[in-house]
Image (cartoon, grey):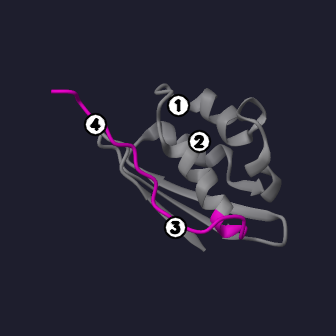
Amino acid sequence: MTRVNIDPGICGLKSVVVVKKKDKQTFTVQIQSDCEMVEKLGEKISELDMMDVFKRILDNPVYVEGSKCLRHTSCPVPSAILKALEIEAGLALPKDVKIEFVTDE
């Protein structure tokens, strides 16, 4: 099981994504979120295939369904879902991701 806690920033609507291996190629996705749109996305992608991590953004089921459910295009949840899938599938090692805003003074 791979669990990812997502603090998306200024909206403050935190999410938890849990990806579990079902069989060699198939994984279940469970999402709990303070955001109704992210919850809806979780309902649409409750199961993913390992090969989904290799699909282009326009063909990727996480982003395809995300484009239907999410109004905020920079939401980090879809990326986090795919990162969790990579880890659970053994295709990557777990390492935190960070976006840092730097302002010139």
Where is the N terminus found, in terms of image quarters? Answer: bottom right
**Which marked residue is nearer to the observer: mark 2 or mark 3?**
3
Q: Mark 4 or mark 1, which has the lower sequence index?
A: 4
Instruction: Say above or below: 1 vs 78.
Output: below
- Label 3 SS: strand
Mark number for residue 41?
A: 2
Gap in Å between the C-alphas at discs 2 and 3?
17 Å
- Amino acid found under the numbered disc labelled 3: Arg
Instruction: Say above or below: 6 vs 94.
Output: above
Q: Mark 1 or mark 3, which has the lower sequence index?
A: 3
Mark number for residue 10?
A: 4
Gap in Å between the C-alphas at discs 4 and 2?
20 Å
The residue sitting at 28% across, 36% down in the picture is 10
- Amino acid found under the numbered disc labelled 2: Leu
Mark number for residue 3?
A: 3
- Mark 1, residue position: 70
Of residue 74 and residue 28, the one placed in the foreground of this image is 74
